[in-house]
Amino acid sequence: MSDNSEHEDEAFAEATLVQAIENQLQSGEPAAAQAVYNKLTLVGYEREEILELMALVLAHEVDAMLRDDRPFDGAWYEQALRALPELPEEN
């Protein structure tokens, strides 16, 4: 049973992150979000793939915030977005 609820938690977390990315794209904040979305679209990525990649970057930063007990690093986040489709290194 715990395997299933763990999977549900992961799916919920991913959906939440994707929603956060969609909010960033709609609001235009940070500007890098839309720029990266456009870049990845031009090189042939599908919308779902782009949102997933961007959500992985956001998850990486949120994990680091929680682990290091520090505020969100917007500069790092924008830099990591701009590096896509290359994903950030695991720390």
Image: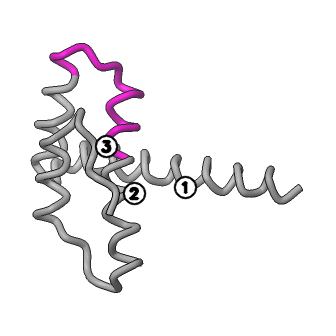
Q: Is mark 1 on a helix, strand or loop?
A: helix
Q: Residue at x 19, y 70 (%)?
A: 73
Q: Residue at x 15, y 41 (%)?
A: 83
**Magenta-drawn segment:** 41-55
**Magenta stretch contains residue 11:** no
- Where in the figure is residue 86, as x and y percent of width and height? 23, 37
In terms of depth relative to the viewer, which is nearer, 77 or 24?
77
- Where in the figure is residue 8, as x and y percent of width and height? 70, 51
The C terminus: image quadrant: bottom left
Q: Residues within 10 Å of mark 1 (few under 14, many from 20)?
A: some
User: In the visual, does 4 lie left or right of 78?
Assistant: right
CB under 8 Å between discs 1 and 2: yes
Q: How crowded is mark 2: few (under 14 residues within 10 Å), some or many (20 or more)?
A: some
The N terminus: image quadrant: bottom right
Q: What element carries label 2?
A: helix
Q: Residue 78 carries which label?
A: none
CB under 8 Å between discs 1 and 3: no
Sequence-first tag of 1 and 3: 1
* Residue annotated with mark 2: 59
Q: Residue 54 carries which label?
A: 3
Q: What amino acid is found at the position of numbered circle 1 in the picture?
A: Ala
Q: What amino acid is found at the position of numbered circle 3 in the picture?
A: Met
- Where in the figure is residue 58, as x and y percent of width and height? 33, 55
- Residue found at the very far bottom of the displayed protein: 69
Q: Residue 13 carries which label?
A: 1
- Residue found at the very far right of the displayed protein: 1
Label 1 and label 3: CA atoms lie apart by 14 Å
Q: Which quadrant would residue 87 be assigned to in this image? A: top left
Q: Residue at x 35, y 58 (%)?
A: 60
